Amino acid sequence: FDEARRLWAVARATYDELGLRFRQAARSPIAASIEMLAGDPAAAERELRWGYDKLESMGEKGVSGTVAAFLAEAIYAQGRDDEAEAFAEIAGQTTADDDLVPQILSRATRGRVLAKRGELKQAEALGREALRLVEQTDFPDLHADVLLSVAEILGSGEDAESLVERAREVWAQKGNVVGAESAARLLAQRSASA
């Protein structure tokens, strides 16, 4: 993580030096991904808020919707469900239907929020839709994230456990050691509580 953060700092300094504020803001999900993998969603939120606010101040709407989707995830990870849902809605409403990343993340976040509220039928429908959409992509990290989101929506049981195992496999195939280890820990926790 130290090396990833160092490399991002170099990239950020280069963007600053060249005056590429739009590009720096649009790339804020890269820095946020580092922080989410490191287990620091508050740091991820700071990166994404900077990017989102900068894009909004420029009047940019398409990329800001994508950043809003990642921001919703970071906020959700901190337990602020209503705020996460609001950003997920922004992402879903301000991006094109075929802009899959924000549409997928929007559904996954909204589904988890609804599941916590006990609105299980609608939550599962959103989760399954996110899963159907992510299968159209070649974005393994997103695929694994959505598998875990749907597992969270489903709660316990074989279906949920199977989704966590699939996420672990996707991350392992991708070479995302941190993600694969995280999913393996989640599987062990689920087994211990069963």
Image (spheres, rainbow, N blue to C red):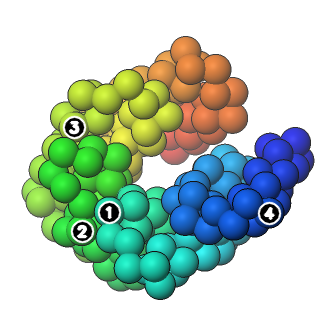
Q: CA distance from mark 1 to mark 2?
A: 7 Å
Q: Rounded to the nearest whole Å, what is the CA distance between mark 4 and mark 1?
A: 25 Å
Question: How far apart are the alpha carbons under marks 1 and 3?
Answer: 19 Å
In x, y percent, where is residue 44?
64, 64
Q: CA distance from mark 4 to mark 3?
A: 38 Å
Q: Amino acid at mark 4?
A: Glu
Q: Residue shown at 80%/63% (left/top)?
A: 17
Q: Residues within 10 Å of mark 3 (few under 14, many from 20)?
A: some
Mark number, residue 94: 2
Specify the label residue 133 is tagged with: 3
Residue at left 64%, top 20%?
175
Q: Nearer the viewer, residue 113 or 19?
A: 19
In primary-sequence order, the first of circles 4 and 3 is: 4
Residues tagged 4 and 1 counted as in contact (Cβ below 8 A): no
Q: Nearer the viewer, mark 4 or mark 2?
A: 4
The residue that label 4 is drawn on is 17
Q: Residue at x 48, y 22 (%)?
A: 170
Of the numbered discs 4 and 1, the one sitting upstream in the chain is 4
Q: Residue type at mark 2? A: Thr
Would you say the residues marked 1 and 2 are in contact, meaning their CB atoms lie under 8 Å apart?
yes
Q: Earlier in the sequence, mark 4 or mark 2?
A: 4
User: What is the three-letter code of the residue carrying label 1?
Assistant: Gly
Mark 2 vs mark 3: in front: 2
Query: Which label number is shown at residue 62?
Result: 1
Q: Secondary structure at mark 4?
A: helix
Residue at the farthest top position: 173
